[in-house]
Structures are given as structure tokens and as C-alpha cells.
Amino acid sequence: QKEVEQDPGPLSVPEGAIVSLNCTYSNSAFQYFMWYRQYSRKGPELLMYTYSSGNKEDGRFTAQVDKSSKYISLFIRDSQPSDSATYLCAMSPSAANAGGTSYGKLTFGQGTILTVHP
Amino acid sequence: KAGVTQTPRYLIKTRGQQVTLSCSPISGHRSVSWYQQTPGQGLQFLFEYFSETQRNKGNFPGRFSGRQFSNSRSEMNVSTLELGDSALYLCASSLAQGATGELFFGEGSRLTVL
């Protein structure tokens, strides 16, 4: 079983829809939770960054972390065709708790391919 | 501010050959990480360098190696290439050691092994 599970989709929605993307994880040491967006033939770019549990909102994007359930979500409101991309969740443990073994290492989900059609 | 630059962007090699990929991090960033991305396995961590020292290594065979120079530029090398090494190799830089997620990725070097 992978440390981070993410439904690869693909997910197709009409413009204006609310999109919900999710990841589950098994490593309770994870403290930092990220969502990256990757357009075709490009490198991933950081979209949202959350430390520990809670919600974070940035424009049309909301990230939620529920550490008790080991579950994170990304919501996209009023989705646009330009949101069509692969969305990757990523996690890392606290550097202080990692014992030096997790430097620079993010554990990624498989990625969800999202298409928003006009 | 220039982003992370990776060269070459595309390359084709044959089995048994070796390849060297280059990465120039964002100016001022001292940490460089390398990841392999394939359709089957997704993004997998290769190694991380900080101040010319390898701080962490993923579960890849010894054919995969890397180094970092005093100007923070990094290279990775894959020797005795196998078909399964075909992938997108991504370099990411961050400001501090012990990345907590704020990695900045380059566009990658797409390697095809025939």
C-alpha cells in the first residue's frame, strides 16, 4: 500500500462547477501538506501549502486537512478551463521530527487529471 | 527572478549508455532535490543536496547519482541505462534545508531510453 493514495481520475467537469480533490495517507508523521498543479509538459507548481490540520483559502481554492482521518482535500470553486491540469497532493513530516531522513523529500500522490470543459 | 532551469529538455539514449542532467536552481536557493516522474509510479524522490552535501537519498539503485557544486547548481547521472529509466526527471530548489514543501520545480528533462 502506498503512503499517499490519490484517485487518478480522470475527472471531467463543466465550467463553473465546484471540484473536490482528495488524498488519504497512512504516515502519521506527515505535518506539511501541499497541493501542486502540473500543466502538460511543465513542472509542478505549488498551489496551496498547509501546516497541520485546518483550512486555508486562496481565491477560488480551499485546502482542508483532517489529520485525525488522515485525509486532505482541495476544493476549486467556479472552475475554469484554465484549471485543466493534473493536481498532485504532497506531504512531508516535520523536519524536526524527521531525524534528518526527510530533507527535501516530499511524498506525492499519483495525481488527479482534471478537465474543465466550457 | 529566473526560475529553475533544467537542461537538456529532451534526450534519447539507448540501453547501456549513461546520461547527465543539469539543474540551475533559483538564485539564492541552496537546496536542490531531484524527482523521477513516470505514469506508473508518479513522482518519486531521488535525492536532495544542500551546500554540496547529499542529505537524503530515495530508493533507487546506485546507477543513479548526483552532485552539487559550490554555486548550488546540480547534476544527476544515470549509468547503464535501462528501458525503465525512461521518465521525466524533475529538479526542484528551495530556500532552506529540510524542505517543508515549498519546492520550486523546473520543467524537467524528458529521457527516452530505446
Image: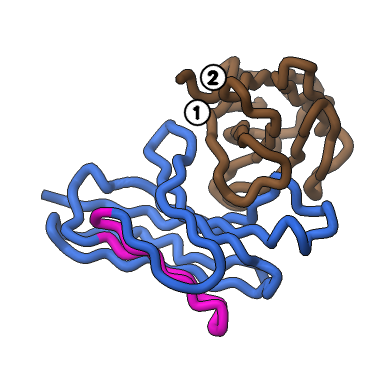
Chain colours: A blue, B brown
* Disc 2 + disc 1, Cβ < 8 Å: yes
State whether residue B13 is above or below residue A89.
above
Q: Nearer the viewer, residue B60 or A64?
A: A64
Task: Name the residue: 41% across, 46% down.
Answer: A37
Displayed quadrant of residue B20: top right
Q: Nearer the viewer, residue A36 or B61?
A: A36
Q: Which chain letter goes with mark 2?
A: B
Q: Main secondary structure of the magenta part?
A: strand
Task: Name the residue: 79% across, 18% down.
Answer: B69
Q: Nearer the viewer, residue A27 or B101?
A: B101
Figure quadrant of the N terminus of chain A: bottom right
Mark 2: which amino acid? Arg
Crowding at mark 2 (Cα within 10 Å: few <14, some 14-19, many 20+): some
For disc 1, the marked residue is B107
Displayed quadrant of residue B90: top right
Residue B89 percent coordinates (x, y): 62, 32
Crowding at mark 1 (Cα within 10 Å: few <14, some 14-19, many 20+): many
For disc 2, the marked residue is B9
State whether residue A61 is above or below residue A43.
below
